[in-house]
Amino acid sequence: MNQPLTKNKDYSAWLKELKNNIRRVQIKAAVRINSELLQFYWNLGQDIVDRQKNANWGAGFLKQLSMDLSSEFPDMKGFSLTNLKYVRQWYLFYSQKIEKSQQAVDQLTQIPWGHNIAIVSKCKNLDEALFYVQKTIQNSWARSVLIHQIESDLFRRAGQAITNFKATLPSPQSDLARETLKDPYNFDFLTLTEKHDEKELENALVKHVTKFLLELGAGFSYIGQQYRLEVGGDEFFIDLLFYHVKLHCYVVIELKSVKFKPEFAGKLNFYVSAVDGILKSEQDNATLGILICKSKNDTVVEYALRDIRKPIGVSEYIITKNLPDEFKSSLPSIEEIEAELNGNEK
């Protein structure tokens, strides 16, 4: 009796490779279709603007166009009146502000239409819009992630931390590392008391590590909390340790629930040196240190980092939804809620 092909190793290996090839073709086809559709939308937007300007077709032009195109192409959803208005808005937003080059249009067509709508609907100027277009291309953001980044004002926070990267890292790594940091970091996904300490902040970030990683940005991989290092027989504990897969380096994060003090930089410098000496391999780049504090005096930070030889950046964090301490203390804990629910089930 012949063995079923599904049990044949050679057939299974070839089938697996064939499936992967088909998926790659599907992805390429989807990208090409999206690009061609958006190129069509660009030309359509230009036509609409020109016709509205030069033809005497009245105020109902777009509504009539929507009905005619939808009747002819009932399976296509892109000809609704709402979408035609978005096509016009999208074209106007960019065409009056960028050079009319094919390269500029090509960049816009690399992201899905829904992403384009979100960007032109929420961004105030060209620089901000192109920033989110480029970040979407680089990081393959889903639309929900893109909208979150726009609403959290990533454009104005990215690359704003005070660092000594130019003095301590080779180019272009220094620029890439600087763009990785934000100032301030937005921790609105946490619910903390107004007088929270570092431990409460640290535990909350670890509890919500997925949202914390989203706020940190693409490339961060979580390693551990209170990561233990032994130096000369003494124990030291790093608040949070990460590895950045794009920068190929460890990242030490220290948290401070108070205003920046110069001695904080010295302690973080020690931790970065220890990670370089103990964990870093020959394949890894220099370890980065990030100090995230409640507030800072920029001039004091600049002086504190001036003579430090390890790459360190200092940022603030914001939480706009702090609970008053007396109110927080009156809320039941998760454990108390679970205990009550379990009691009611019995």
Image (cartoon, rainbow, N blue to C red):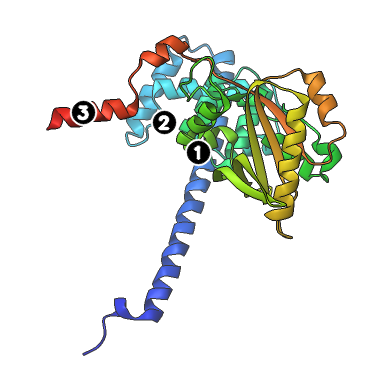
Q: Which residue is mark 2?
A: 78
Q: Quadrant of residue 109?
A: top right
Number of numbered tags placed on the structure image: 3
State which tag comes first along the sequence, 1 or 2: 1
The answer to whether residue 289 of the structure is visible from this angle is yes
Q: Is residue 256 left or right of residue 174?
A: left
Pick whichever, 303 or 243, lies toward us: 303
Q: Secondary structure at mark 3?
A: helix
* Residue 327: % across, % down: 41, 11
Disc assigned to residue 37: 1
Query: What amino acid type should be assigned to the residue bearing mark 3?
Result: Leu
Q: Residue at x 65, y 19 (%)?
A: 125
Residue pointed to by mark 3: 341
**Quarter of the rendering occupied by the N terminus:** bottom left
Distance from label 1 to label 2 (Cα)?
Answer: 10 Å
Point out the image quarter for the C terminus. top left
Q: Nearer the viewer, mark 3 or mark 1?
A: 3
Task: Name the side, left or right, on which 166 lies relative to 76.
Answer: right
SS state under label 2 = loop
Of the two numbered discs 2 and 3 on the same chain, state the one appearing first in sequence: 2
Spatial CA distance of label 2 from label 3 is 49 Å
C-beta proximity under 8 Å, tags 1 and 2: yes
- Location of residue 166 with respect to 279 vertically, above or below: above
